[in-house]
Image (spheres, rainbow, N blue to C red):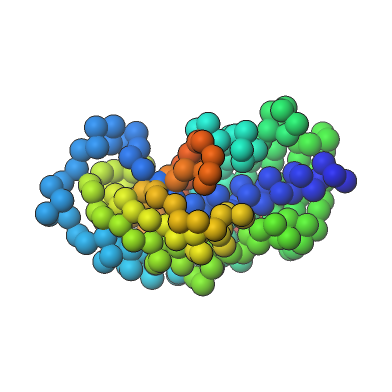
Amino acid sequence: MRRSLVLAGALSLLLAVSAGCTERGADDPAGAGENSTTLPEAAELLKGAATELGTVKTARFAIATEGAADTLGISAAEGVITSAGEAQGSAKIEQGGLPLELSFVVKDETLHVNGLTGGWQKLPLATAAAIYDPTAILSPDRGVANLVGKATGTTTGREEVGGVDTYRIEGTLPGTALGNLVPGVSEDVTGTLWIGADRKLLHRARFPVPGQTGTVTVTFSEYDAPVTIRVP
């Protein structure tokens, strides 16, 4: 059961990190962008994104870590999540120094996990929610919309992320908001956000692991696409 609790905690953090924030990425290796005098104000973009994100019902996410797997216990993950707190995807984690590839489903207050013992396991969602509540991710009051709305920064460029035209904002993510999404975080973090130029949605984020080495990059796509989460 101890192993299951550790796994639940890792998956909870996985779901939490899928709402995090970032810096300059591969789509803009040289940091190229428009002259800052021609870019919209960051405050305007962040306010618009907070409003737009508050209406999102579903999203696809992909997580990549650099030098943070030992700290977070997660090296990569991808999947879909809904505003109802359901989720489905896969993750590469480290447990006891060993790499594991897992599949997970969150539905009807239950966390389903495959890859730990060779078959699917069922755990009460409360086991994970004691560390993190997955319904927070797309919650207008506690989730990524709240985080973006309370962030401050400067628009530093314009670039494409996954084929979407975005503005890059570098600034401060308040610990009071980030703590709702990443357990244990209470301090402000300097990161970068990529906000859509057309529909103001968060398309990429990267942030350092507070107090540790390494970074986490999260990419969002397929907002409001139809999603069906099935219990295995």
In this rendering, would 37 be left or right of 108? left
In this rendering, would 118 be left or right of 148? right
99 lies above or below 160: above
49 lies above or below 22: below
Residue 77 location, x and y as percent?
A: 58, 40
101 lies above or below 83: above
* Residue 171 in sight here: yes
Determine the residue positioned at 32% across, 50% down. 170
Residue 202 location, x and y as percent?
A: 39, 55
In front here: 232 or 94?
A: 94
Q: Residue furthest right?
A: 1
In front here: 72 or 168?
A: 72
- Quadrant position of residue 180: bottom right
In front here: 230 or 187?
A: 187
Residue 87 location, x and y as percent?
A: 63, 54
Determine the residue positioned at 68% across, 45% down. 10
- Quadrant position of residue 70: top right
- Quadrant position of residue 69: top right
Residue 143 location, x and y as percent?
A: 52, 64
Determine the residue positioned at 65% across, 62% down. 133
* Residue 227 in sight here: no
